[in-house]
Amino acid sequence: MMKKLFAEFFGTFWLVFGGCGSAILAAGFPELGIGFVGVSLAFGLTVLTMAYAVGHISGGHFNPAVSLGLAVARRFAWADLPSYWGAQVLGGLFAAFLLYLIASGAPDWSAGGFASNGYGDLSPGGYGLMSAFLIEFVLTALFLMIILGATSARAPAGFAPIAIGLGLTLIHLISIPVTNTSVNPARSTAVAFFAETGAVGQLWVFWLTPLLGAAAGAAIWAVLLSDRSKVASENKEVA
């Protein structure tokens, strides 16, 4: 189990360090800024690369919502959920801490939003709570459906990380203007505590909504899309 937890720690660390780091360190760099398209791609690449690197050890969740969704779909043990969540949150926090140390070395630097998520005044486009709730719910649900489909026993072997990474890239392309994209409570928690805004006060939205969305997406997949004749073999593979 410890190997699995370390894999989740490092995978979530890389997601936050690479994804949020691209936003904090590179997106606004004069003349060379990568923009929100580059940030979207960075988040997708973190999941893709770590899924190949350590996914065979822990399953490559790197996200409390993904762990919950896989448990709902009977692809992951409920008893392991608290320890996975702990490893994911700690990995994200460590990455955010290192990013803060690095970024604060620049002259006249201010943390500002620090790549945090938000609605209302903290939304990049000024979107309200309802918009934030809906987009985070829908996109997390669809993300779980992508994960469950790509890792199904009947899917082409070896390509799941590519589909999942590109799926996360697309999710960011859609929702960065609305919430700065969460779909991952560990990612939201990691940077909120370093932001010089009210991000911590809105953090509940970016826990509750992705978890609900993940559970809904997993339930939809299990009831409507999965091949139930394959469920037993898939459960053995995940275990």
Image (tube, grey):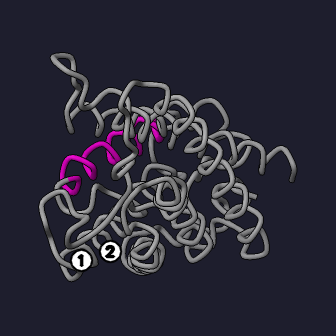
Determine which quarter of the picture holds residue 72: bottom right
Question: Mostly what secondary structure, the magenta segment?
Answer: helix
Q: Is residue 210 visible?
A: no
Question: As drawn, is 227 to the left or to the right of 181?
Answer: right
In the figure, 209 relative to 64: above or below?
Answer: below
Residue sitting at 52 percent across and 59 percent down?
193
Give the residue type that dot 2 points to.
Phe
Crowd rating for badge 2 (residues with CA inside 10 Å; few <14, some 14–19, many 20+):
many
- The residue to which callout 1 is attached is 134
Tag of residue 137: 2
Residue 165 is inside the magenta segment: yes
For this view, does 99 lie left or right of residue 145? right
Viewer-side residue, 188 vs 164: 188
Visible residue check, residue 168: yes
> Residue 206: x, y in percent?
42, 71
- Report if residue 27 lies within the magenta region: no
Q: Position of residue 177 (x, y in %)?
A: 17, 55
Tag 1: residue type?
Leu
Magenta stretch in the rendered image: 159-176
Give the secondary structure at mark 2.
helix
**Pick the front one: 68 or 14:** 14
Residue 151: give x, y in percent of width and height: 51, 50
Residue 57, relative to residue 106: is it above or below? below
Dot 1 alpha-carbon crowd within 10 angstroms: few under 14, some 14 to 19, many 20 or more: few
